[in-house]
Amino acid sequence: MGFFVRSATVAALLVPRRVSIACLKAVLAAAWRGLWRAPVSTPALAVAAVPAVVGTLILAGLLQTGLAPMVLPMAGGFLLVGPAAWPVFLALRRAGSLRGAAAALQGVPRGLWALAGVCLLLFLIWMSDAATVYSFMIGGETGIGAERVAWFLLLTSVMGVVLALIVFCIAAFSVPLLLDRRAGLVPAVMASVKAVFTSPGAMLLWAGVLGVTGIASALCPLLLLPVLPWLAFAGDLLYLEIFPPDHGLPDIPTTHQD
């Protein structure tokens, strides 16, 4: 009983502020400027290079094996696992160095691991469903017409949008709330969902920005170098606008470390 009382109390304290589309635009602009400021620029781009290289190899593998129609579903799957990498960029932005970020990420709450596991599970479900639809609609047949490929892409896109919106609602703000240890898993997810529905216009646009830029970057993995840290920094700034901390963020280093 005590757990549920505490969870309800914490959730009540995390009242999201309403934000406008103008605020979202300002956050995106500020995050872009912040990305290119030392000392955070170099480590952020270095971390982003890892998924860029992995994405390039996956893209090349799909094209090489004749699975070109699966490229778009795979790119969409990037949106489902993106939240799992977000804490790294959050810690980088605040610590200013890889060493400081590593220190900040030590002993992260178990709820954050659980949330990352949920995102990974949804990604596996998504890829399994997309592969099943691919086998039924296209399979190993040769000379498949453009119409059938278009129907496959349309169907999988609808399925992917539903899963991506679910992940967006539960992870958009719960990830930083968990990283900052301001709430447990359940209160953080509840607060995240509430924040999304408190500012529907701005959140719908934010989800659209994440979706379009994320898929475009996954289709051209080199774009992940600037786009991934840019969106991560913007998400952090937006989180601080919606859930401003009363007494700072003591659990995350805020001073730059060499």
Image: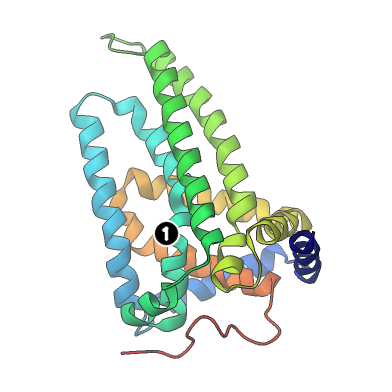
**Is residue 28 among what the camera can see?**
no
Q: Where is residue 242 in the image (x, y as percent from the top left)?
A: 70, 70
Give the answer, above or below, for where 65 lies relative to 142: below
The image quadrant that residue 76 belongs to is top left
The image quadrant that residue 244 belongs to is bottom right
**Quadrant where the image shows the N terminus:** bottom right
Name the kind of residue labelled 1 in the image: Ala
Q: Which of 133 and 153 is in front in this view?
A: 133
Q: Where is residue 83 in the image (x, y as percent from the top left)?
A: 49, 55
Does 42 sit left or right of 126 as displayed?
left
Give the answer, above or below, for where 86 lies relative to 147: below
Give the answer, above or below, for where 131 lies relative to 39: above
Q: Which of 102 and 22 is in front in this view?
A: 102
The residue depicted at 31 percent of the width and 47 percent of the height is 220
Q: Nearer the viewer, residue 6 or 140?
A: 6
Tell me the residue that label 1 is attached to: 85
Secondary structure, mark 1, is: helix
- Label 1: how many Cα within 10 Å (few below 14, some 14–19, many 20+): some
The image quadrant that residue 44 belongs to is bottom left
Does 253 sit left or right of 11 as displayed?
left
**Is residue 158 among what the camera can see?**
yes
Does 137 sit left or right of 176 as displayed?
left
**Quadrant where the image shows the C terminus:** bottom left
Q: Position of residue 69 (x, y in %)?
A: 35, 26
